[in-house]
């Protein structure tokens, strides 16, 4: 869910995703490359993201960028809907209602 959410507005490369997850979660989601890349590969296999390589320009090395697909956007909407329901239910239990 979080990886798809980060890709919702723009394409990103792996290290960029790792950095943003860590930064935007105040360090709670500090993924290692060995955790993120299998997630990205599975999302790609499931047609939720696509990847493309950037061109090497000057001293810049080529990077593999990930882009959310229409299927990924639909899946993200459904996951968020389910998450909201789970979160609401947990809140009700925690609040004693």
Image: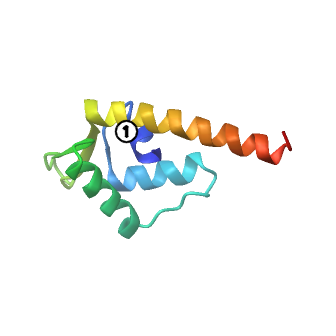
Residue at image x 84%, y 43%? 95
Side of 43 where 91 appears, left or right: right
In the depicted structure, whether residue 30 falls above or below residue 95: below
Please provide percent x and percent y for residue 16.
39, 50
Measuring from the top left, give residue 14's x and y in whole percent: 33, 54
The quadrant of the image that shows the C terminus is top right
Residue drawn at (47%, 53%), measured in percent from left and top? Answer: 19
Density class for disc 1 (Cα within 10 Å; few <14, some 14-19, many ≥20) is: many
Whether residue 57 is visible here, answered yes or no, is yes
- Quadrant containing the N terminus is top left
Residue indicated by mark 1:
7
- Is residue 10 at least partly visible in the picture? no
In the foreground, 66 or 70: 70
In this picture, residue 74 sits left or right of residue 87: left
Q: Position of residue 11 (x, y in %)?
A: 30, 38
Q: Residue at x 55, y 57 (%)?
A: 29
Specify the quadrant of the image occupied by residue 10: top left
31 to 63, vertically: above or below: below
| Side of 7 where 91 appears, left or right | right
């Amino acid at each position: 869910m979080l990886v798809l959410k980060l890709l919702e507005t723009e394409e990103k490369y792996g290290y960029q995703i790792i950095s943003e997850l860590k930064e935007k979660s105040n360090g709670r989601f500090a993924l290692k490359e060995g955790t993120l890349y299998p997630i990205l590969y599975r999302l790609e296999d499931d047609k939720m993201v696509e990847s493309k390589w950037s061109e090497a320009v000057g001293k810049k090395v080529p990077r593999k960028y990930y882009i959310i697909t229409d299927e990924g956007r639909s899946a993200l909407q459904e996951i968020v809907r389910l998450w909201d329901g789970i979160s609401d239910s947990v809140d009700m239990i925690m609040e004693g209602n």
